[in-house]
Image: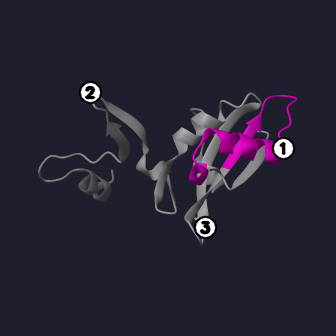
Amino acid sequence: MQPEATARALEPEGWLHTGDSGYQDEDGYFYFVDRRCNMIKRGGENVSCVELENIISAHPKIQDIVVVGIKDAIRDEAIKAFIVLNEGETLSEAEFFSFCENNMAKFKVPSFMEIRTDLPRNCSGKIIKKNLK
């Protein structure tokens, strides 16, 4: 049990703070964006890891992708992409960054990329981001 975390999540008035970020559209529907702990703070903007991963995963050479925020003295956090390529593929930095620049806002383009053969996962298959920071 984590009584301190429970106290932070539950207000006396009954509100539950889940740590999720989302938005409501003009029709009143709510949409989940990402967990706040997975948001990258970059130069005053909040950048969703899930949004970037969804965009980058559309690249035909990329099998798996995860992005994380890493400490940056200028913009709070820099964005680093860890990439697993499809078998037999190669991907240059220029090709990767060009793809990102053409598909997302400039402030969302990762500053760094690293190609790996696999990504660290827990027993249920979820990527362990803290092992990549």
Q: Would you name the residue on which mark 3 appears?
A: 72
Please provide percent x and percent y for residue 111. Answer: 68, 56
Identity of the amino acid at label 2?
Answer: Asp
Q: Is residue 100 magenta?
A: yes
Name the amino acid, label 3.
Answer: Asp
- Which badge, 1 or 3, is on the more N-terminal residue? 3
Q: Nearer the viewer, mark 1 or mark 3?
A: 1
Q: Considering the numbered disc 3 on the image, is that residue within a helix, a strand or a loop?
A: strand
Q: Which residues are magenta?
A: 81-108
Q: Is residue 84 left or right of residue 34?
A: right
**Mark closer to the observer (1, 2):** 2
Mark number displayed over residue 92: 1
Can you see residue 122? no
Whole-percent x and y of residue 64? Answer: 69, 34
Q: Secondary structure at mark 2?
A: loop
Callout 1 amino acid: Ser
Judge the density around disc 2: few (<14), some (14-19), many (≥20) Cα neighbours within 10 Å. Answer: few
